[in-house]
Amino acid sequence: MSLFEGLMLITSIHILAAASPGPDFILVSQQTLANGKKAGVMCSIGIALGLSVHIIYSALGLAAVIASSEIALWVIKLLGGFYLLYLGLQCVKIKAIKPNEEKVNVSHPSMQRSYFKMVGLGFLCNALNPKAPIYFVALFTIVLSPDMPFVHIVIYGLWMMLIQLVWFTCVALLLSQPRINLAFQSFSHWLNRILGSAMILMGLKVLLTKIN
């Protein structure tokens, strides 16, 4: 398979995977609606960086080992499930914004530090996804070959990270549009509870689902 053919195949598969509703989508949506466009973009950057973890161990041939190891999958399952529960509880606990409350100045040092925290949230949300090893085994089995040049693997990995970043940045930009954002602000408190509850349900599903 040529480099171009591999890129086309990865693009068609990974766009569908990135666009499918999941923890990453909920996190970016919640952070954008609650904290603004930059918060959503920071989470998107974190998610793209988190993808590098899966790409690296897949390129090293460890994805198949992880996917076939019940102990490894249980560890990832517990870490990912409890992290989703943590994110969901944080969303549920967000207080409603009163009409007379002023927005925090984004240039404030504490807000700048929180942006780094949002990158970390996105990174862990993606890196601890228990479904990722199986997904990457399936994807890389199709694309990779023993004689593939290392530079091709690097290009595939960077391309997948770029797809992930562009998709979730577009989600953040869309939800931060004044009309859309204003429409959500009137029931933002309940929206946070809904998104948080969805994250909690995902976490519970991860923890309660048996490993095949």
Image (tube, rainbow, N blue to C red):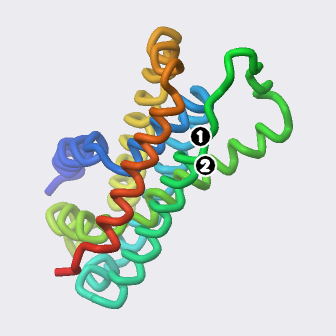
Q: Nearer the viewer, residue 129 or 182?
A: 182
Q: In this view of the protein, can residue 55 be seen by the observer?
A: no
Query: Given contact means CB atoms under 8 Å apart, are the residues at marks 2 and 1 in contact?
Result: yes
Residue most extreme to the right: 109
Where is residue 147 drawn, in percent x and y? 23, 73
CA distance for labels 2 and 1? 5 Å
* Left or right of residue 147: residue 178: right
Quadrant containing the N terminus in the rendered view: bottom left
Indicate left or right for 38 with 54 as reference.
right
Kind of residue indicated by mark 2: Val
Relative height, residue 88 to residue 114 (above, below): below
**Residue of label 2:** 119
Amino acid carrying label 1: it is Met
Percent position of residue 15, x then y? 26, 41
Q: Quadrant of residue 35?
A: top right
Seen in the picture, residue 107 relative to 13 is either above or below; the reply is: above
What residue is at 47 percent from the left and 62 percent from the top?
85
Residue 56 visible here: yes
Where in the figure is residue 198, as x and y percent of width and height?
A: 36, 48
Does 72 sit above or below residue 22? below
Q: Which mark is residue 42?
A: 1
Residue visible at 47% across and 41% down?
A: 193
